[in-house]
Amino acid sequence: MLHFDGLVDSGDGLIAPMPRSRRLEVMATPHAGAFGVACGASVLLLRWVALASLRPSILLVGGLWGLSRAAISVVVRSRPYARPGGGLATAFAGPARWPILIAGTAGAVALCAAWRPGPGIAAALCGLVGGAAVVALADRRLGGYTGDVLGATVLLVETVGLLVAAAKW
């Protein structure tokens, strides 16, 4: 539920039209606005549709799960934190152990490919593009990432990957 909360907060703070100075403040409040609710409902509906139309495999689901966590590990080690003075997500920051991150990412992609080689790799790559879009938007609108952005990234990597996997190949 923390990742879902991050998605909703990111929807409110990154998509809604407002001055940059107010975005972090909006993301820190416990209230969900219209943009956050729309993002949350859309992701839940899209995940349900993808899982209902596809016979999910533990290889695909596990691969996308691992890929989403590898993606946020790279974000934490390569992007600046957006809140002055830090926050909860900075606890995960530290020196980059690139061989471990690369191995984890490769392992997650391999799980997706073990499900079905072409569609599995496409699902993984498109999932990463979806996650990268969230991070790029956060960079542009906040100047870095927050814990909410990491949660949104997890859900977007998984959801986009599931949608691509559910496409009729």
Image: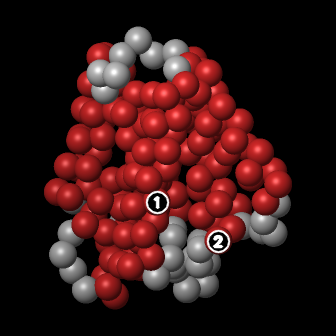
Does the rendering let one see residue 103? yes
Image quarter where the C terminus lies is top left
Q: Is residue 117 left or right of residue 164?
A: right
SS for dot 2: helix
Depth check: give the residue in front, 83 or 159. Answer: 159
Above or below — where is 86 with respect to 1? Answer: below
Q: Earlier in the sequence, mark 1 or mark 2?
A: 2
Q: Is residue 46 left or right of residue 139?
A: left
Q: Which residue is mark 2?
A: 78
SS for dot 1: helix
Q: Amino acid at mark 1?
A: Ala
Depth check: give the residue in front, 40 or 143. Answer: 143
Q: Position of residue 152 (x, y in %)?
A: 43, 53
Q: Is residue 140 left or right of residue 41?
A: right
Q: Amino acid at mark 2?
A: Ser
Residue 110 lies in quadrant: top right
Identity of the residue furthest to the top in this view:
55
Residue pictured at 82% horizontal, 54% vertical: 99
Residue pictured at 59% horizontal, 74% vertical: 79
- Numbered mark located on residue 29 in the image: none
Q: Position of residue 96 (x, y in %)?
A: 78, 65
Above or below — where is 133 with respect to 82? Answer: above
Q: Could you tell me how far apart the alpha carbons at marks 1 and 2 are, in whole angstroms?
A: 12 Å
Q: Is residue 40 left or right of residue 110?
A: left
Dot 1, how many residues are within 10 Å of its Cα: few (below 14), some (14-19), or many (20+)?
some
Residue pictured at 57% horizontal, 35% vertical: 65
Dot 2, how many residues are within 10 Å of its Cα: few (below 14), some (14-19), or many (20+)?
few
Q: Position of residue 4 (x, y in %)?
A: 41, 45
Residue pictured at 30% horizontal, 40% vertical: 43
- Numbered mark located on residue 132 in the image: 1
Q: Position of residue 158 (x, y in %)?
A: 46, 39
